[in-house]
């Protein structure tokens, strides 16, 4: 039996975890959950002082979330327990290939991981666009995220990208794709 964990660490029943569309009023609570797990996911990839320079909950609430969600067809979904967000995902049509859905973010609070919440959020994205291939970018060195997506049948698709959040800071990324159409070749 899969058990969920609340943001405070108390065990909750899977039926007490609700997946729903986020609203702008949710953004502060989402960012408060998202920020620490985002920082943790970059451990060993970027130094903490660099993370301080490129992200903050306030920036996400006021700029990043609203800008991302202004793109046509984009949405944010949250997993919550006891009214508190314990996971989030943001996805929508890829700009270059609108027939593909890009997952821009999928994060689960650290003490709620390994309880199926990330899979439920991913399923929400998959069900919102049932026939579209899903794509995402993942830092080459983020083995935890790469392992999650590979277990969910995502495959490296040959795309590469170097994220340059600050001058002199280069973070190589690889593209992943979940083929729901016939793969090329």
Image (cartoon, helix red, strand yellow):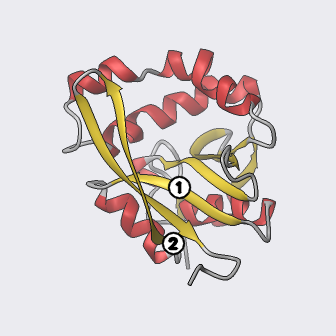
Judging from the image, what secondary structure is the residue with disc 1 in?
strand
Q: Which residue is mark 1?
A: 136
Q: Residue at x 72, y 60 (%)?
A: 124
Q: Are marks 2 and 1 in contact (CB under 8 Å)?
A: yes
- The answer, for residue 170, to whether it is visible in the render is yes
The quarter in which the C terminus is drawn is bottom right
Judging from the image, what secondary structure is the residue with disc 2 in?
loop
**Residue 34, relative to residue 165: is it above or below?**
below
Question: Residue 32, percent across and down?
Answer: 50, 28
Tag count in the figure? 2
Q: Residue at x 75, y 28 (%)?
A: 70
Q: CA distance from mark 2 to mark 1?
A: 9 Å
- The answer, for residue 12, to whether it is visible in the render is no
Q: Residues within 10 Å of mark 2 (few under 14, many from 20)?
A: many
Question: Residue 39, percent across and down?
Answer: 34, 36
166 displayed left or right of 109:
left
- Asked which quadrant contains residue 43, the reply is top left
80 displayed left or right of 164:
right
For residue 97, the mark is: none
Q: Residue at x 58, y 24 (%)?
A: 64
Question: Residue 89, percent across and down?
Answer: 61, 47
Q: Name the one closer to the observer, 158 or 178.
A: 158
Q: Which residue is mark 2?
A: 154
Question: Residue 27, percent across and down?
Answer: 65, 27
Q: Residue at x 74, y 42 (%)?
A: 75
- Asked which quadrant contains residue 141, the reply is bottom left
**Residue 78, relative to residue 164: is it above or below?**
below
The quarter in which the N terminus is drawn is bottom right
């Amino acid at each position: 039996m899969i058990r969920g964990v609340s943001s405070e660490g108390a065990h909750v029943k899977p039926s007490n975890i609700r997946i729903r569309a986020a609203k702008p009023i949710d953004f502060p609570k989402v960012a408060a959950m998202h920020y620490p797990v985002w920082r943790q996911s970059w451990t060993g990839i970027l130094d903490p002082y660099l993370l301080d320079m490129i992200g903050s909950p306030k920036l996400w609430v006021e700029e990043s979330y609203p800008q991302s969600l202004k793109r046509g067809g984009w949405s944010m979904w949250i997993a919550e327990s006891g009214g508190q967000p314990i996971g989030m995902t943001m996805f929508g049509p890829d700009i270059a290939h609108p027939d593909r859905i890009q997952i821009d973010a999928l994060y689960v609070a650290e003490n709620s991981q390994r309880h199926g919440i990330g899979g439920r959020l991913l399923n929400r994205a998959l069900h919102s666009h049932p026939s579209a291939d899903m794509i995402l970018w993942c830092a080459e060195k983020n083995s935890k995220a790469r392992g999650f997506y590979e277990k969910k049948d995502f495959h490296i698709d040959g795309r590469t990208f170097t994220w340059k959040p600050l001058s002199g800071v280069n973070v190589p990324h690889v593209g992943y794709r979940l083929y729901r159409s016939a793969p090329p070749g």
